[in-house]
Amino acid sequence: MMGVAACGLPVDPRHTTDTVRGGTLRAGLVGNQAQTEFDTAHLKSLAQTRQAELDVVTGTTDELIELLSKGELDVVASLPKETPYRKQVGLTQTFAHPGWAKPRVWAVRSGENEWLIVLNNHLGGSK
């Protein structure tokens, strides 16, 4: 009988999970006031659980996805579920809030699967 070796998944090729832990959570916010208040609260909580400082920038979706793709952000919060960037980035599970017209997702750099799991677990109570 053949044994199966652990493949070490999930992984973060760019080590986002490790970089944020005890460092700085660099986040981008897109959206209206109700969305950014919700996301800011969750980003602060996430930073606290990761023992990280929180650095938040706001901008358009295009600007923030560009910063994310360059590695200048760790997460972009409050994107619409049907974002046109879904093939370029990793997306969290969909979550909703009573004040929103449509469900939202957060984005991470493509391939940062361990970080995506951390975010999904953190946002899990937000559905």
Image: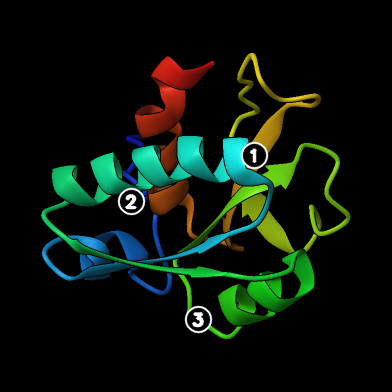
> Measured along the vertical axis of the image, is residue 42 above or below residue 112?
above
Amino acid at pointer 1: Val
Q: Which mark is residue 8?
A: 2
N-term-proximal mark, 2 vs 3: 2
Residue at (41%, 41%) from the top-left corner? 119
Crowding at label 2, few (<14), some or many (≥20) Cα neighbours within 10 Å?
few
> Measured along the vertical axis of the image, is residue 1 above or below residue 40?
above
> Is 9 positioned to the left or the right of 97 in the image?
left
Amino acid at pointer 2: Gly
N-term-proximal mark, 1 vs 3: 3
Based on the displayed image, in which of its 4 quarters is residue 122 positioned?
top left
N-term-proximal mark, 2 vs 1: 2
**Residue at numbered disc 3:** 71
In the rendered image, the quadrant that contains the C terminus is top right
Image coords of residue 102 (percent x, y): 79, 26
Q: Residue furthest front?
A: 33
Crowding at label 1, few (<14), some or many (≥20) Cα neighbours within 10 Å?
many
Image coords of residue 100 (percent x, y): 71, 25
Could you give the CA–CA distance between mark 1 and mark 3, rounded to whole angstroms? 19 Å
- Of labels 2 and 3, the one closer to you: 3
**Residue at numbered disc 1:** 105
Residue at (68%, 50%) from the top-left corner? 31
In the rendered image, the quadrant that contains the N terminus is top left
> Is 101 positioned to the left or the right of 71 in the image?
right
Give the structural element (helix, strand or loop) at label 1.
Answer: strand
Crowding at label 3, few (<14), some or many (≥20) Cα neighbours within 10 Å?
some
Image coords of residue 73 (percent x, y): 48, 73
- Mark 2–mark 1 CB contact (< 8 Å): no
Q: Nearer the viewer, residue 88 or 60?
A: 60
Could you give the CA–CA distance between mark 2 and mark 3, rounded to whole angstroms? 23 Å
